[in-house]
Amino acid sequence: MISLLTALLLCPQEPLQVILEAPDGALVTHDLSSPLAAPLPEGVAFVRYSQPAAAPKAEAQSARVELLDGGRVMAQVIGGEGDFLDVSILGDARLRVSVDELSSVVIPERIPAAWGSRLEPSEEGDRLYRLAPRGLERLEGTLEEFTEAGVSFATSVGTKELPWTEVCALFIEALGDAPLVPPSGDLVVVDLADGGRVHAGLLEIREDEMDLVTRAGRGLRLKRSAVSELFVPGAGARYLSELTPVVVGPEGSPFGDGFGMVWPHRVDRSVTGGPLRCGGRLYTRGIGVHAPSKLQWELDGSWSTLKLAVGVDDEVLELGGQGSVVFRVLVDGESRFESELITGGQGPVAVPPVSLEGATLLSLEVEMASDLHVGDRADWLRPVLVR
C-alpha cells in the first residue's frame, strides 16, 4: 500500500491548461504553469479551463441581479455606497455594480407566497417592493442612494430609509446611457458556473483564478471553479440565443391550447426555467423548448456556419415519461439536418456544421414522437453562429 501511494505521489500531474477556441472550432492550448495575460491572441472567440467547473449550490436569500448589458448574477447583497451596489457572488467574489448598469435586484425567497401579482418595473421612474408588516408593499419613486445598511428611496410623500432585510425587489429605470466599457483588459463575457454572466475586462488567467475589471472600474477575482467559459464579442462568432426569433410557434402545446398546458421557449434555460443539463453536463448557453416547437430567425447573409448540439434535458429523468423528439434545422426553407429519434438520458448529440452561406432565414424545429409527450423537453445546446 505504501509503495502504491508513493508511486501515485511521484507520478507527474497533468498540467492545467486553458483552451483557446477560434470561431471555426480550431483549438490552441496554453499551459498555465505560466499565466495567460491580456491581450488574447487574435481570432480567439472562446476561452475555458481544461478542467470544467462544477455548479455550486445556491445560497439562501440570494438576490437575482440583472444588468442592462445582459449580465446577471445570483448574489448576496453586502451593502452599498452612493451610486454603487456591493454584492458577493459564488461564495466570496466581491462585485461592485454602478446604478447606471443596474436593471433590477430581486430576492425571490422574500416574496410572500400569498402575493399573486408579477414583480415588474414601473413604466416611469424606479420601483421598490418592500416586506411590510401586512405583506408586500409597492413603492414608486426614485432611488436616492445605496448604503451599507439599506436603500434610500424617494417617494411622493418623502424619502424612506429601508433596511436591506425589508427590500424584496428593486427595479431601476434605464436612462438610455450605454453601459460603460471596462477601462482596461480584453472585453469578455464570463459565463459563471452557477448560470450567471458578467461582462468585464480580462486581465490575466492563472491556474486557480483569473483577474478581471468590471465596467464600474473595480477589480474582480474569480476562482477557477466559478468560471464555465469566456466569450470574446466581435471575434467572428455569436450565440444564436442572443438573437430574438421573428417567428415563434407553434410551441410547447402538445395537447392543444385549450388545455392550458403551454411551455414557451426559454433562453439559456430549460423550458421549465432550470439550468440546461444534458448528459450530466451543464450548458450556460442554449434554448430550452417543449415539443412541438418552431423558432425562426432572419439572417443578413453574412454568417457562414451554425454549430450546435441537441438533446432532451436531463430534468426529464425524474419524470414518468422521459421524452422522445426529433430535431430539425432548416435554412431558407430547405432541411439541412434532421435527427434520429432522441430520448431522455441519451445525452447530447452533436449536429454536423450547418452551412449558412448567403442564408436569410434559419428555422429550428422540434417534433413530438409517438411516446408520452410529458417529457418532450428539448434543448438546443450552445448554438453558435460563425461569420
Image: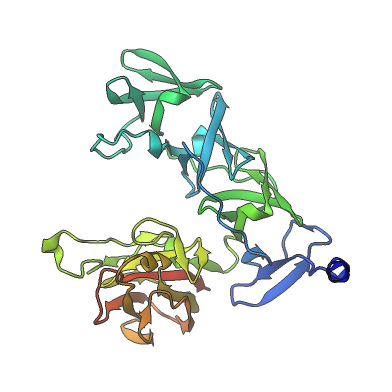
- Side of 120 relative to 278 (left or right): left
- Image height check: is 287 above or below 90? below
Residue 42 showing in the rendered view: no
- Side of 349 relative to 193 (left or right): left
- Side of 9 relative to 376 (left or right): right
* Along the line of sight, the residue nearer the viewer: 32 or 300: 32
Tell me where residue 153 appears, x and y as whole percent.
41, 21
Tell me where residue 276 appears, x and y as whole percent.
44, 63
Residue 366 showing in the rendered view: yes
Tell me where residue 185 appears, x and y as whole percent.
70, 50
* Along the line of sight, the residue nearer the viewer: 186 or 145: 145
How many numbered marks, from 0 up? 0
Tell me where residue 347 appears, x and y as whole percent.
47, 76
Q: Residue furthest top?
A: 158
Q: Quadrant of the N terminus?
A: bottom right
Which picture quadrant has residue 118? top left
Which picture quadrant has residue 379? bottom left
* Along the line of sight, the residue nearer the viewer: 379 or 1: 1
Q: Residue furthest left?
A: 258
- Image height check: is 59 above or below 159? below
Which residue: 25% across, 67% down? 251
Which colour style is shown?
A: rainbow
